[in-house]
Amino acid sequence: MNLFLSMVVPENTDCQKPDKLNLDEALFPRIAANDMAAFEEFYRLTERTLYAFVLATLKNHDDALDVVQDTYLKIRSAAHLYQPMGKPMAWVFTIARNLTISKLRFKSKNDNSVTVTDIENDPNFSYVTDSEDRLVLQAALKILSSEETEIIVLHAISGFAHREIAKSLGLPLSTVLSKYHRGLKKLKKYLIEQEVKKYE
């Protein structure tokens, strides 16, 4: 089942939920103690979600990979600072978002351009391998706001419930729900228009 396409085509998106990301907070003390097995497990569980989260804002494959790598380095060095609170991904997203903002500031000083060109021209971009999913993600990056894209990809890729996304992003649940449904409507409209253009 296509990750992104399944989000747009059926009206009832809860019927095909991806597996939920279950992250054990006990990994962080182990990472802090330089347990490489714990770090590898953390990486394996979070890489796709973290990449999608960063890509939603940067809209550039190479920049997203840079920030994801920096995020993992930061987490490895700061794991001893993690305070158990029942939502480890919120902490991870906070680090990733801060590094993403720094990257955007750096880019704006240098070239004033953050585009989707690299993604459109790279057939192997991201961790999304299905061609239809890739088209939907490209569309999302073009037409949706960063927050709409973050919410949709977090729900599609890692199976986060809307309530969990709201907590992780520090947004009211009503805002997450409205942005999610508004984003899906935009995507569906755009994809239908693109399909119609093929036959004109």
Image (cartoon, rainbow, N blue to C red):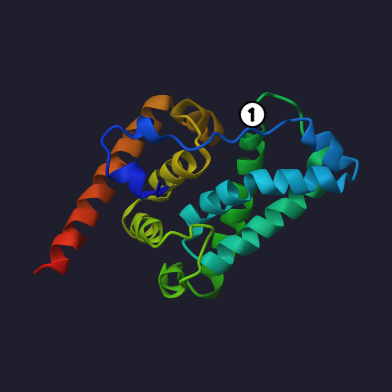
* Residue drawn at the location 24% of the way across and 55% of the way down: 191
Relative to 31, residue 83 above or below: above
* Residue drawn at the location 48% of the way across and 54% of the way down: 57
Which residue is most to the front? 1
Residue 178 rendering spot, x and y as whole percentages: 32, 33
Residue 75 rendering spot, x and y as whole percentages: 75, 46
Residue 67 rendering spot, x and y as whole percentages: 63, 59
Crowd class of label 1 (few under 14; some 14 to 19; many from 20; radius 10 Å): some
* Residue drawn at the location 27% of the way across and 44% of the way down: 9
Can residue 131 be seen by looking at this rendering?
yes
Can residue 81 be seen by looking at this rendering?
no
Residue 126 rendering spot, x and y as whole percentages: 52, 61
Which residue is most to the right? 33
Which residue position is annotated with label 1?
87
Q: Picture quarter containing residue 11?
A: top left
* Residue drawn at the location 51% of the way across and 56% of the way down: 55
- The three-letter amino acid code for the residue at tag 1 is Lys
Looking at the figure, which quarter contains the C terminus?
bottom left
Image label count: 1
Which residue is most to the left? 200
Q: Picture quarter containing residue 133?
A: bottom left
Relative to 84, residue 45 above or below: below
Relative to 3, residue 122 above or below: below
